[in-house]
Image (tube, rainbow, N blue to C red):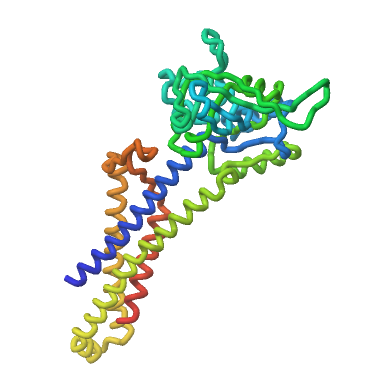
Amino acid sequence: VIAYMAVGGVILGVAALVIILSVTNGFAGEIKSRLIGMNAHVNIRRFDGGPIEDWRPLIEKLQGFAEVVGVAPVVDSKVIIASLRDRSRVDGIPIWGIDPETFPAVSDLPKHLQYANPEGEILLGELEELNKRGIILGEHLARRLQVGPGFDVLLVTVRNLDVDGAVMDGLAPRPWSFLVTDHFESGMYQYDDNYAFIHIEDAQRILELGDAITDIHIHVEDIQRAPEIRVLLVEEFGYPYSVRDWTQLFPEFFRWIELEKWAIFLALSLIVLVAAFNIMSILVMSVLIKTPEIGILRTIGCTVGEIYRIFVYQGLAIGGIGTLLGCLIGFGLCFAQQSFDLIAIPGDVYFISSLPVDMEVLDFALVALISVIVCLATSIYPA
């Protein structure tokens, strides 16, 4: 009975470890895809943050790279936004000026639109029948301003005061009226609570950029190769351009996810450790109980090493069987969740409707290896 309990402890610990690690991988993957999906895999801008004047040749050159699957010009700035129906509702937000034709190639924005047509078309630019510009707001930002599609908002920019051809010290606010055409909900709070999108030509107009842009967003075929491609682009373009990939845009965030994963791993490893000590206690009891039999074996010629191996193999068998069954049970439960979404979670609270799972061979191998080593180590003392 005690041996079965020891095997059960190893099974429980190993299964818990592989399941939790797979769920952590799943959440990390979902967050990564949403966070990066709204942003660029690789971003190019000037070192000084100034406008890029002659940007079209840069985009043509980027489109010649085999690894690049999408390129889009972007105007990135900050403005003050206010609801026209209630001007007390004011906020400062980052705003992106985008080209509705090229931006879907570098962003998942169309997937997150709440009121778009079935094709997910981005409704921006001049709405001639209403004679107003279009703007897409993050869902939380729209709620905070209490505006929806069809409502008007004011964007306030600042420009240098120019009197008689001389630039004066100070700034003059300038309001621009926009019509809310849609909301987006990406599931990432930093986007949904802050960001807004307008047509790139509107952004150039209200920011007085002429034909210039501030950023070039790039999507690559293999997101894991983005750092390598960044190095190639740095060599190709160099100064005055700054090239950054997604690992540099959110370094602390992904470092935190990795740290959390291994903190959970260490915590749950205690279950395997407890099960291993159970194996040790079983073997100690077995040695005490079977002392007469050990004496008989010694009498008929068994060496100390042979008897030693008997008990080590017993501990290794308990640990090995428990590890194998734990991995199989963990794999089975994870596979069932992947295939049938057995565990649902509230989509209005979280950004997904079912528990995400992403099984990695390395995680299973690492858990199995550590489990077997711990069980083997605890078998040596009683042997």
Single out the residue that lies furthest toward the left: 1
Where residue 123 sits in the image (x, y, percent)? 50, 18
Q: Quadrant of residue 239?
A: top right
Q: Residue at x 41, y 63 (%)?
A: 266
Single out the residue that lies furthest toward the top: 129
Q: Quadrant of residue 155?
A: top right
76 displayed left or right of 343: right
Where residue 240 sits in the image (x, y, percent)? 75, 37
Single out the residue that lies furthest toward the right: 165
Q: Quadrant of the N terminus?
A: bottom left
Q: Quadrant of residue 383?
A: bottom left
Where residue 98 sits in the image (x, y, percent)? 58, 25
| Front residue of 217 and 176 | 176
| Front residue of 165 and 333 | 165
Vertical arrangement, residue 89 with respect to residue 296, above or below: above
Q: Residue at x 55, y 35 (%)?
A: 39
Q: Residue at x 28, y 49 (%)?
A: 332
Q: Is residue 59 in sight in this rendering?
A: no
Vertical arrangement, residue 154 with respect to residue 361, above or below: above
Where residue 331 sits in the image (x, y, percent)? 31, 51
Total marks drawn? Answer: 0
153 displayed left or right of 369: right
369 displayed left or right of 166: left
Q: Is residue 258 in sight in this rendering?
A: yes
Q: Residue at x 72, y 33 (%)?
A: 50
| Front residue of 147 and 201 | 147
